[in-house]
Structure formats: C-alpha cells, structure tokens
Amino acid sequence: MQTRIDEVADGIYRLSTFVPEIAPPAGFTFNQFLVMGEEPLLFHTGLRRMFPLVREAVARLLPPERLRWIGFGHYEADECGAVNEWLAIAPRAEAVHGHTGCLVSLNDLADRPPRMLADGEAIELGGGRRVRWLDTPHIPHGWDAGVFFEEASGTLLCGDLFTQAGDGPALTEGDVVGPAIAAEDLFGFSSLNPGMGATIRRLAALSPRGLALMHGPSFAGDGAAALRALAEDYDRRVRAAGGRAMPAVDA
C-alpha cells in the first residue's frame, strides 16, 4: 500500500490509501486531511496499522512534530486509531472533539487531555484559517459524531458522510450522491433515525464549496445541493423503515 497526496482545496491536502481487499472488486479508500496553518490540523488519524504510511505522507508536507490539532468525526479505528501515535511524535498536539466524544472516549483513551468543543465552536489555525465543529449525533453513525467546516475555503470535512467504494480521482465535480446511496445499500452503515435529514440540511445551510470525503473523492461544487439530495435519500429510508422524518431546522 502507499498513501497518495493531493491538494483538494487551498491549503487542504488529502492523504489517501487505497485498500483493494475491502469491498472487492471496487476496493476502498481511507482518507485523512491535513489543513495547513500556523497551527496545522490533521482530520482523521488513520488506522493504527496505517500510521507509518500516513506519517510518511504528512512528513512530505510538513514536519509531523509541527501538528497542533488531531481531530476526527467519531470514535472508530479508521478515524482515530492512531491518535496516541500522533500525540507521541507531535509534542504540542492536542486531540480535539465534541463534548460527547471527549466525555465517553477521548478523556480516557488519549494520552494527553483533549480539547473539548461545543457545537458551533471554532479553532483558529492562523493565517486566516479557522475550523468550526458541528455536532451531528448518530449521523451517519456514532453518538459522538460531528464534522469540521473550514471557513476560508468553504470545505466541509465530512467524515463518513458520502462514503463510497472504489478508487476514483482525488477531486471530482461529478456526482457524489449516487455512489453514496449505492454504498449505503451495500454496507448499511448509517444509524437511521428521524433527525437525519434535518441534521444534514443544517450542514447544507453552510453552503460548502467543497466536501472532503473520508472514503471516496473530494468534491468541488455545490455542496449544499449534494447535502440536500443526501438528506432526501435518508428521509426516504426512514419512511421506508416505518418512521417519520423530522422537519428541517434552520442552522
């Protein structure tokens, strides 16, 4: 395996490792995102066993010990399995997550105390770059789930939202909703609940110009339209399961 590096927005780099043995014959990508700044952020740590690959990729962009923030969407091995490995090589780094993730996981598992963020709280990375944390509980799964929105580039760091199989381009202006629907049909990875559509539409209200997918290509274009279409599909699934989707709530 090797980790590919691509700049998918100004100062945001996608570190992508393709694993053909997962979901064959298409295979599956595991992506981390390095957000540059005076206080750089790595979003997703990667699996613990992938740490050497990802560390090498980060080192091609900046000295790994310069990392300041280690974030992820929810507690899962591919999102945070290597958190302590990163904390060990970056002495100023802090893990960062929402209240739930810190209270139920990070306060215990992280080798240094994490930075706990409230819903909507932002971190200044310097150089005019700021990331804002948004709680998305149970969406697509995980009680502690959330996303970061990088405001300068308008990039939503999506975590497992829009997951798709395959090893496509690093960046696309094409359809990311259809492949995400197909992946949901294949894996059934989402925790269907009445609030899914409303929570995703709250993200659409940010009008992101880019979507940084953990599994699949990053997207450049009308992120709000893609999020609304994904919300509609989840509403459909909730109704099909006998539930009632909640109305949209303004951001």
Image: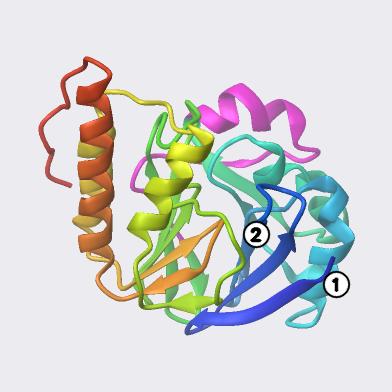
In x, y percent, where is residue 233?
25, 42
Q: Give amino acid for label 2.
A: Thr
Q: Secondary structure at mark 1?
A: helix
Mark 2 and mark 1 in contact? Answer it, CB < 8 Å: no
Q: Give amino acid for label 1.
A: Glu
Q: Is residue 55 above or below residue 86?
A: below
The reply, left or right, for residue 124 in relation to residue 149 is right
Q: Quadrant of residue 149?
A: bottom left
In x, y percent, where is residue 58?
76, 73
Label 1 CA crowd tier, 10 Å (few <14, some 14–19, many 20+):
some
Q: Outermost residue toward the front?
A: 25
Camera-nearest label, 2 or 1 = 2
Residue sitting at 42 percent across and 47 percent down? 182
Question: Which segment is the magenta one?
Answer: 100-123
Mark number displayed over residue 56:
1
In x, y percent, where is residue 40?
62, 70
Residue 120 lies in the magenta-colored region: yes
Image quadrant containing the N terminus: bottom right
**Camera sees residue 133:** no
